[in-house]
Amino acid sequence: MRSAAEIAAVCEEIVLDVGLSCVLRHRAESGKKAIGFLPIYAPREVVEAAGMLSVGVLGGGDQIEIIRGDAYFQSYICQLPRSVIEMGLSGKLDALDGMLFPAICDVIRNLSGMWQLLFPNKYVRYIDVPHNHDWEVGGKFYVHDLRELGRGLAGVSGVTPSDDRLREAIALHNENRRLLRALYDLRARAPHLVPTAEAYVVVRAGYQLPVEEHSAIVREYLEAARVSGRAPLDQSRVVLVGSFCEQPPLGLLKTLERAGCYIVDDDLVLGARFLRGDVDETGDPWEALARAYIAHGSHTSSRYVAGEQKGEYLIDLCKKRKAEGVVFCAPSFCDPALLEQPMLQTALEAANVQHTSFRYSENTAQFQAIHEQAGTFSDSIRLWSEDQ
Amino acid sequence: MSEQRSRSEAKTDAATEVEVPKEPSMLLQKELISGHFDKLAEAHERGQKVVYTFVPGNLTELLLAFDVLPVLPEINALQAGMRKKSGAYITEAEKLGHSEDVCSYVKCDIGMARTGLGPTGKKMPPPDMLLLSYTGCFTFMKWFELLKQEFPNAEVAMLHVPYQGDGIVTAEMRDYVVKQLRTEIVPKLEKLTGKKLDEDKLKGLLERSARAEEDLVWVLESGKHHPSPIDGYFGGVFYIGPIFTAFRGTEEGEHYYKVLREEVAGRIARKEGPITPLGPLNDQRYRIVVEGPPNWTSFREFWEMFAVEGAVCVASTYTKVGGLYDFGFRHDPTRPFETLSDYCLGCYTNLNLPSRTGMIAKYVKDYQADGFIVHSVKSCNSFSAGQLLMLREIEKRTGVPGGFIESDLVDPRYFSAANVKNRLESYFQMIEQRRRGGVGAASEVSP
């Protein structure tokens, strides 16, 4: 049996491989084509029902040097689209036959048009998830959009995503979602057993693997983590917010933990856990996906929820996870995260939950200042909070 | 003042801020807009409801059918910018925790909301409803969520307008918007006002909109003349003011566009150019298409940088953010909900990048432009993300050189006059060199 650290090391290798060799290998072995998707959430089940691999594209992180990407974006645009363009132009995304761009912000939206201009022979689709959650209005619009996506993908693969194939994909992803929920629950109960740097790569590796293969890895990691024998440390319990799109470098996550923060929940790689409940495996699977999006979609800044009390979900999450504070960790120039942040901070202050904030980019290399800030935040919780 | 002014005279004027006569339509426009702010100041005292909404995808006719007054927060922000008030409001919002990275319109509006005043210094009533028309800009959504925090008693209505990701409007997209109008927007307006929608009144408003739109298009397309009788960017901002704000569908709005059309027709007959801050621009050396919104904090200075070079903006994309009419769309009173839906779906920033690129390339050809300039603003990713690629594509398709300048909407910290001026001068020099067959001419591609 492999140790948790060994499993995480394998996952880390997959995550850091921006050349997608893992995807290339699966393509070669299975003969399947592959479709990429940008953050946050894309209905991967439809891609897989159309007989293709679905591959999450989260940017080049600190693994690639941006040479061409910077020539496509002004200095005030976030880092992720630069590295995605860099990867596209340098052939690192050649394994992908198409790309899905979910509605999340204006930059990702416009990136869909850039892809159309730069790669006219690739399949490109903008996924316009509904902000109206009335089933007869937004729900039915989204069902139609999902079916259109299915037709478009069938044109790429030659495989029609039948209802049965879609139900099968939904069942596989339900299993994967249950395992990821178990992983997050374990980390919240015993964060010393599941360091976030490990949990993160274990989750993110699923963006490059067939879902069954990934589920097997998560299952193995859960078993290994439970018996890892790691000792608990006197650290603060925090929730990390704002990292749902451009991902922080792994070093930053390690820095936070080394600085005394146990991350007991987060919105990293949020797309993998976007649906917080199972998708119905009976009935019309297209409608089931749409209903799940409306009923179980995550609370995040790019999703409009009518009547939502801003920050309520975050306060509930802090209670559920017994978190003592919130770390706002958003990419520079991230409109959704940074526009949301003041509203969440106001709500946290009203609920007497401590918070701190800083920004990063996916290729941030210096963590000293963040280490000091997070360390001070953790100390302030442990040493001087009212509960002490 | 002489109409045929030399560039050196104009440069002197730019430095000394000589007052030049304004076009009559500009005065009328100013009167309309300031009159609207006056009406707003007393709206609640009169028992009139106030609805905040956005320029792209605004449902002015529907609001007016309910006798409510629209407030456009972007207009408030840009008016504050033009009055040099936005910097202080932005600083106030940043003190409240808003990031320096995000849209300056939003921060200006939040800072201004705390004062209870509008940009003219008169009282700005709090919203009775926040009508969030999610058209072509993600930030709108967050903006209204933030305003909801400022005005917790305001009702919120959300109209989700799907993006033209594939460059088309499908029947399902239209149907989705129509359903929202019928099931979400109209019922909430009926509840707010205690009135049932009067469809005949709405149709009457839409009829007037279509007539005004006809005149507006005629005016905007007059930029195809030589010399151009209008500045389709800086002057265009004034031309679109009434129809993009509270006057679409109104008698005053319709009248304004008649007056404007007559004024422009007169200039065409006399072969005159538009009046710029430096006076009439008859000697037009460069015909330019502009992409992107203007800078508001240094609007006059920015315009002067063009005028002093003899550059006239013959067409622009910014004048299409509140409605894209020059490709045939007009509000159709016979199908009120569908036409409102088509209007929202067709606004400029709701178009995908290939459509925007094709549109600008068409402008360059149709308006016989010597070049095009992208003014990229830090605040607006909806406009800005992808503009560098658009620039290359348009150059490739038209053979006409593109220029790129950067600043912001209403954050004065991001308008570097020296840099912008330097870039513009270099750009115009480059066009001049190409005309003479110098550097760059060899690489010209035939359209």
Image (cartoon, helix red, strand yellow):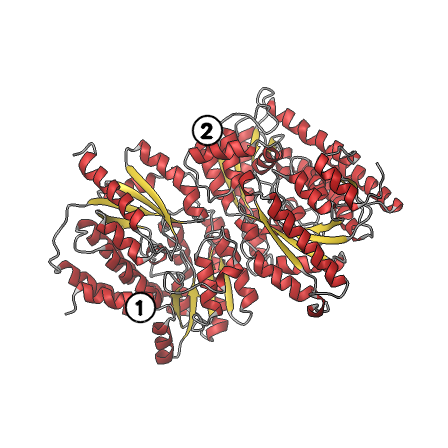
Instruction: Please state if A327 lies on the left or on the right of B337 as rendered.
Output: left
- At x 21% / y 49%, what residue is drawn? A188
Quadrant of image for the N terminus of chain A: bottom left
Q: Which mark is residue B153?
A: 2
Q: What element carries label 2?
A: loop
Q: What kind of residue is marked 1?
A: Ile
Mark 1 and mark 2, same subunit? no
**On screen, residue B332 above or below A54:** above
The label number, if any, that marks residue B164 in the structure image: none
The quadrant of the picture occupied by the C terminus of chain A is top left
The residue indicated by pointer 1 is: A14
What residue occupies the far top of the structure in this picture? B45
Q: In this view, does A45 lie to the left or right of B304?
A: left
Q: Where is residue A298 in the image (x, y as percent from the top left)?
A: 36, 50
A326 sits left or right of B170 in the view:
left
Task: Write down the chain letter for disc 2.
Answer: B
Neighbor class of circle 1 (other Cα within 10 Å; few <14, some 14-19, many 20+) is many
Helix, strand, or loop for circle 1? helix
Name, please, the residue furthest toward the right.
B270
**Which-is-in-front pick, marks 1 and 2?**
1
**Above or below, B18 relative to A158:** above
Q: Where is residue B433 in the image (x, y as percent from the top left)?
A: 73, 61
In this orientation, which residue lies closer to the viewer: B107 or B278?
Answer: B278
Distance Cα–Cα, label 1 vs label 2? 50 Å
Indicate the quadrant where residue A5 lies.
bottom left
- Left or right of A102? Residue B211 is right
For the residues labelled 1 and 2, say whether their Cβ atoms are less than 8 Å apart. no
Residue drawn 22% across and 45% down?
A237
Residue B3 image position (x, y, % from top left): 84, 41
